[in-house]
Image (spheres, rainbow, N blue to C red):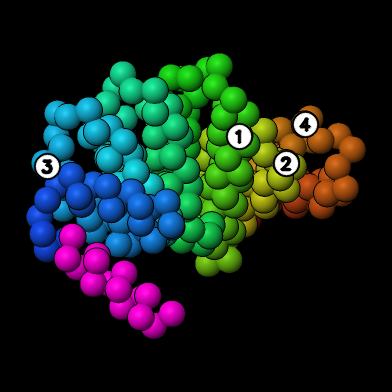
Amino acid sequence: MAISMFSCKNEFERIRAGGNPDMIYEYGFKLYEKEEYLKAQTLFEQILSSYRGKEQAEKLYFSYAYTHYYLNSYLSAAFYFKNFAQTFSTSSLREEAEFMAAFSNYKLSPGHKLDQTYTLKAIEDFQNFINLYPNSPKVEQSNAYIDELRVKLEQKAYNEGQLYFDLKQYQSAMQSFENLLRDYPETKNAEMVRFQILESAYLLAENSIYEKQKDRYQEVLGKHEVFKNKYPRSKMLKEASAIRNKSNEKLKEFSNVRYQN
């Protein structure tokens, strides 16, 4: 076994150093088929420029992109698959390359607590794929990935609103929650989010300077009406009504001249 491994290493080095593009091409695909992707990638990279404009270039570049994917270099894989799709726009492999560019960005998408740049990129790429190939068998899978990624973005948006709330930055919390409902109108958490908007509005009013309190308590009543109309059977309706009643009591005080003085 040791002799065999040594022999293979020597052959790889001999062919790589020999500089013969045809021999490197042939041996590179031999390694690729054996799933020795790092060595295959090294050889493919060496001859990419030699085959530019030739018939073999399409297979070579496509396989080169896949070596990055198989080696978990998803950033590079996304780049090379996208570049392949643009360079070989009439290729029968373009559809797969477009999908793999999106899927590579999907692989780069981190947990919802981290930066979601690649999540957004993956969604964009999957949507472009669907638009380009509406009859592709991969459309259903692409839509499923988009839904999964959007849930991650929604969770991040909710966490941001909750963080503002915990930090007692109620105006920012309210704005974040309202943005969440605008961006994800089908969210399953809409009821809770609308209640937190109401709660944030009340706490904002309560912690405001006197000159702003009246307008803000009136805004609370408006938020309560929205919540009550949308969720008349909500388990949180009792709490919502308590917030409305407190706000009404505060507003009554504003009509009391002695209180104002």
Q: What residue is at 31 percent from the left and 18 percent from the top?
A: 90
Q: Dot 2 corresponds to which residue? A: 188
Mark 2 or mark 4, which has the lower sequence index?
Answer: 2
Q: Dot 1 corresponds to which residue? A: 141
**127 drawn magenta:** no
Instruction: Tell me the distance, in whole angstroms, between the alpha carbons under discs 3 and 4.
Output: 63 Å
Mark 3 or mark 2, which has the lower sequence index?
Answer: 3
Asked if 120 appears above or below 92 in the picture, the reply is below
Asked if 28 appears above or below 83 in the picture, the reply is below
Instruction: Tell me the distance, in whole angstroms, between the alpha carbons under discs 2 and 4.
Output: 14 Å
**Quadrant that contains the C terminus:** bottom right
**Quadrant that contains the N terminus:** bottom left
Instruction: Tell me the distance, in whole angstroms, between the alpha carbons under discs 3 and 2.
Output: 52 Å
- The answer to whether residue 91 is left or right of residue 174 is left
Return the residue found at the far bottom: 2
**Amino acid at pointer 1:** Gln
Q: Which type of secondary structure does the marked residue at label 3 adopt?
A: helix
Q: What residue is at 39 percent from the left and 28 percent from the top?
A: 93
Name the mark nearer the viewer: 3 or 4.
3
Name the mark nearer the viewer: 3 or 1.
3
How many residues crowd mark 3 within 10 Å: few (<14), some (14–19), many (20+)? few
